[in-house]
Image (tube, helix red, strand yellow):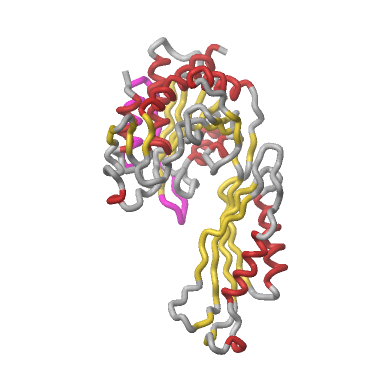
Amino acid sequence: MIDPVELTRELIRCPSVTPEEGGALDLLQDVLEGLGFICQRLKFSQEGTPDVDNLYARIGEAAPNLCFAGHTDVVPTGPEDAWSAGPFSGELRDGAVWGRGAADMKGAIACFVAAAERHLAKGPPAGSISLLITGDEEGPAINGTAKMLKWLAQREERLDACITGEPTNPEMLGEMIKIGRRGSLNAALTVHGVQGHSAYPQLADNAAHRLVAMLDALIAEPLDSGSTHFQPTSIQVTKIETGGTATNVIPGRAQAAFNVRFNDLHTSDGVADLLKQRLDAASDGAAYDLEISVTGESFYTPPGPFSDLVADVVAEVTGRRPALSTTGGTSDSRFIKDHCPVLDFGLVGQTMHKVDEHVAVADIEALTEIYAAVLERFFAS
């Protein structure tokens, strides 16, 4: 039988820093084909973005098709000498598996593969089991899940329900299921002034001063106070720079970047309009440029039979009834929600993206049990 702990370690040893495949999809394909899955590798490209390798695996031809969605790409490791063991070592120590991707989200992928094997050992599924695995979730998310779903639609291949294995639990396994996510918008603001000598400000127009005033106008008042299912919209400044190196030069240009996580009271177009209104009011006539890119709209999947089924299983295995939440960052469920009921449930996310990322062995084993029970009940319902 597949040991989910050992498979997690093997996946971690594949250095699949986005957008590199790193051998992780090769490993998964080999394991899944050994279980009888039909695997198809899908490489997508788009000008200005890296080519991305993806994997779709399915066993069974009938409906319903229960899909597991995930990603094998990981964020960069940061300084490797800061890790207590190599970031791609997959070390087993102190009751945990250590390495980049352990929590986000190679561990959950290993759990689902092991759970699928346990289910298949009892006979073929009363429907189909599939895995939709991308190498582009931590990257631009352009050549991954969105294009895979379009490919499936062109083949008239349907997903009936989906679990995305993102690390949803804040501290303990079983605390939280995500049934929605805020939208995400990135903005780059450039303010134009007139460069000059810092001793003669009357001869210059300080772009940095104007930028600070405009940023203050953006964040001084919240865009909203939250909605029934979501937190208030958040604007977070992530970068400020003038490009200058001298201490006695007034900058003629200043730039900032900020991220907006918005709830279901807004669309990305609506958020963009609100941002421009505030910037126009605070610019005092200064010239500025605003570039906006949207990585996802907000969405909410109302609780229903599928989320009830998963929550019941989680409660039975862990002893904790999970909260149905919309907190946190984006996930590829933002694409899948247009195709079928989807929820996110995976491991504990306390160390994701950090140095010394790790997950407890006990949690890997329990998550495998949860996924196996979900498969059993889904096809029995």
User: Horizontal and vertical percent for residue 256?
Assistant: 55, 65
Front in this rendered view, residue 172 or 135: 172
Front in this rendered view, residue 132 or 189: 189
Q: Is residue 1 visible?
A: yes
Please report the bounds of the magenta region as a residue range: 22-50
Residue 301, quarter of picture: top right
User: Horizontal and vertical percent for residue 85?
Assistant: 27, 42
Answer with left or right where residue 83 lies relative to residue 146: left
> Which residue is painted at 51% across and 62% down in the image?
239
> Which residue is painted at 43% across and 32% down in the image?
56
**Which quadrant holds the N terminus?**
top left
Q: Is residue 63 visible?
A: no
Answer with left or right where residue 273 lies relative to residue 333: right
Front in this rendered view, residue 224 or 273: 224
User: Horizontal and vertical percent for residue 294?
Assistant: 58, 51
Residue 207, quarter of picture: bottom right
- Above or below, 302 against 285 in this view is above
Answer with left or right where residue 35 lies relative to residue 175: left
- Above or below, 267 against 110 in this view is below
Residue 116, quarter of picture: top left
Front in this rendered view, residue 81 or 204: 81
**Which quadrant holds the C terminus?**
top right
- Above or below, 96 against 46 in this view is above
Toward the top, the furthest residue is 122
User: Horizontal and vertical percent for residue 89?
Assistant: 27, 39
Residue 376 in magenta stretch? no
How many numbered marks does the figure carry? Answer: 0
> Which residue is painted at 43% across and 19% down in the image?
369
Residue 40 in magenta stretch? yes
